[in-house]
Image: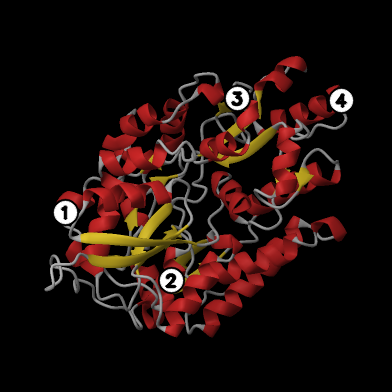
Amino acid sequence: MHSPTPRRRRAPRLTAAAVIALSTTLLAGCGSGGSGHDGPAADGKPVTITFWGWAKGTKEVVAAFNASHTDVQVSYEEIPSGVAGGYAKISNAVKAGNAPDVFNTEYQQLPDFVSQGAVQDIGKLVPTELRNKYLPQAVELTTLGGRTWALPLDAAPQAFYYRKDLFDRAGLTAPRTWDEFRTTAQKLKQADPATRIATFFPDDPSPFETLAWQAGARWFGTTDGAWKVDIDSPDTRRVADYWQQLIDDDLVRVQPSFSQQWTASLQKGETAGYVGASWGAGVLKSSLPDASGKWAVAPVPTWDGSPASGMLGGTTFAVSKDSKKAKAAVEFSSWATTTPEGIKARIASGTSSAYPAAPELVPVAKAAFNTDFYGGQDVYALYADAAKSIRADWTWGPAMGATNNSLKDSFAKLTGGGTIAQADGTAQQATTAELRNRGLKVAQG
């Protein structure tokens, strides 16, 4: 793994002003952490913690942990991914008082769970030695108000996956810029009228948010102790108009993310590319076993040809507010994210290509991930370069649930006359209203 410069790799935590803006809700109902497991129970039986998640390879990680530990055991329940209903399930469980001890949440959702009081500060259980194992930007994305709310599993720089055989047949190479991406899409369609270069997911706003991040947008910030919401910004509109034109010109498909419809389109070669993230290599490999050797990975296109990336997803382990077994939960979470055994179990499943948030484990992941599907390509070298180009100064807002729900509702109308730009404007209004509803100050203009 190449060592990034701190300036380029740095992904920000909330500023002091942002913390002030969160203060009326940030700590409400949050436990202080530090309670729970100190070893086997008095009867000699192991402490059992409950864990909810959906990330690929998780069941293999849990199995490996349980096989190698006698004092703590993990009872795992797989739930839908966050945008597919997992976050709603977690929130409802927290409100009902029956949440799991630990659960997975993406970086973008963590501030929302913190502001809801759904998770507890685990800072007392995370010594400096453990904290230093993670990428600085991953630590900062899990640190709000100077407190530690989760442990990071992976970083998720963007990448473009494409059917190299279909591109070769059409005499095309992977596009370096978004202008080239559009031209390539046109030529693919000319070569085969049934083929499209990629898909816009109407049910998952995360890819669009990451494209806005890559383009230089800053959806959230603070000024004078108030939140500034700028979803409908010029940089975002540039991305929105670009993808809207691709949709209007029938150069990309509009299909639900990771659906049977999407998978079938990839299997048939009707969709020849996927704008995803580092974890996407495992998704394609496990979803399209008959396409081994046909796919390749390239840097995600950029507006000017210079490397630039956002972070699409990325998973953390958070301890629910009412858990009395925080120490055991952190023991499992740290093992899953910072040990060779934990990372190897996840990657060796063949379903995950997570880029570890702990840099020293990147070689472990690289060795464990069979790249035959990608013609032996060194995909982790590409991810390492992409991670260096993640744009700084991006902050996730404290009500991303409201933001995402608004975008999803609007994106669902794209095939019926709605536009991405309209969705941005609606999300701007919905997010601002939700922040005010939570008692947070919102800057005017």
Q: Nearer the viewer, residue 277 or 88?
A: 88
The reply to whether the C-beta atoms of the residues labelled 2 and 1 are less than 8 Å apart is: no
Q: Amino acid at mark 2?
A: Phe
Q: Which mark is residue 292?
A: 3
Q: Secondary structure at mark 2?
A: helix
Residue where numbered disc 4 is placed = 190
Find the distance from the CA under tag 1 to the CA under tag 4: 56 Å
Whichever of labels 1 and 4 marks the residue nearer the N terminus, that label is 1
Disc 2 crowd rating (10 Å Cα; few below 14, some 14-19, many 20+) is: many
Residue at figure coordinates x 33%, y 79% from the top left: 27
Q: Nearer the viewer, mark 1 or mark 3?
A: 3
Residue 122, by quadrant, is bottom left
Q: Is residue 372 above or below residue 300?
A: above
Whichever of labels 1 and 3 marks the residue nearer the N terminus, that label is 1
Residue where numbered disc 1 is placed = 128
In this image, 62 relative to 209: left or right? left
Q: Secondary structure at mark 1?
A: helix
Q: Secondary structure at mark 3?
A: loop
Residue at figure coordinates x 49%, y 40% from the top left: 351
Q: Amino acid at mark 4?
A: Gln
Which colour scheme appears in the figure? Answer: secondary structure
Residue where numbered disc 2 is placed = 113
In this image, 312 relative to 51: left or right? right
Q: Secondary structure at mark 4?
A: helix
Find the distance from the CA under tag 4 to the CA under tag 3: 25 Å
